[in-house]
Image: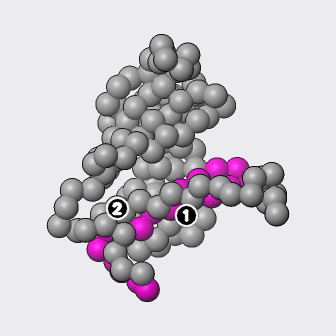
Amino acid sequence: MATRSGLSMRPQPMIAVRDVRASSAWYQRVLGASSGHGGDEYEQLLVEGQLIMQLHRLDCGHHHGTIGDPALPVGNGIALWFETDYFEAAVRRIRQFGASVATDAHLNPNSGHREIWLRDPDSYLVVLAES
């Protein structure tokens, strides 16, 4: 059965973060997202009303156990990749916000599109690529 987006399955990644409110504010500023839940333990981030990712407090287990091991570094080995139709606007937001840029806006010769690579407050690698 297809959903309202036309896909029968959609990714809804959840990452473990130290401070849900701070991470939510960072992602809202960088991605132009909005809060779909809010709180100290869990957050849903929306763009144009669609869930794009979830944040979960690292040391909070709820009914399922913790998402990550609080004794280990977070953010290692994962790239959160976002494609946007509004790349220039995203780069302007990133520059105005002063986000930590790992690799500045550039043309990826393999894909033929522009990208900017960032580090979020928990050191997750976040890539914004133009559509």
How many badges with numbers are in the image? 2
Q: CA distance from mark 2 to mark 1?
A: 13 Å
- Horizontal placement of 63 versus 38: left or right? left
Local packing at callout 1 (Cα closer than 10 Å; few below 14, some 14-19, many 20+) is many
**Disc marking residue 9:** none
Provide residue 39's location: percent of width, then percent of height. Answer: 47, 72
Is residue 62 rendered magenta in the image? yes
Which residue appears at 51% of the width and 50% of the height? 28
Is residue 75 rendered magenta in the image? no
Provide residue 62's location: percent of width, then percent of height. Answer: 41, 83
Query: Helix or strand or loop: what does disc 1 sit on?
Result: strand
Residue kind at label 1, given as amino acid type: Gln
Query: Which stretch did the figure color magenta?
Result: 47-63
**Disc marking residue 44:** 1
Which residue appears at 28% of the width and 48% of the height? 76
Residue 21 visible in the current orientation: no
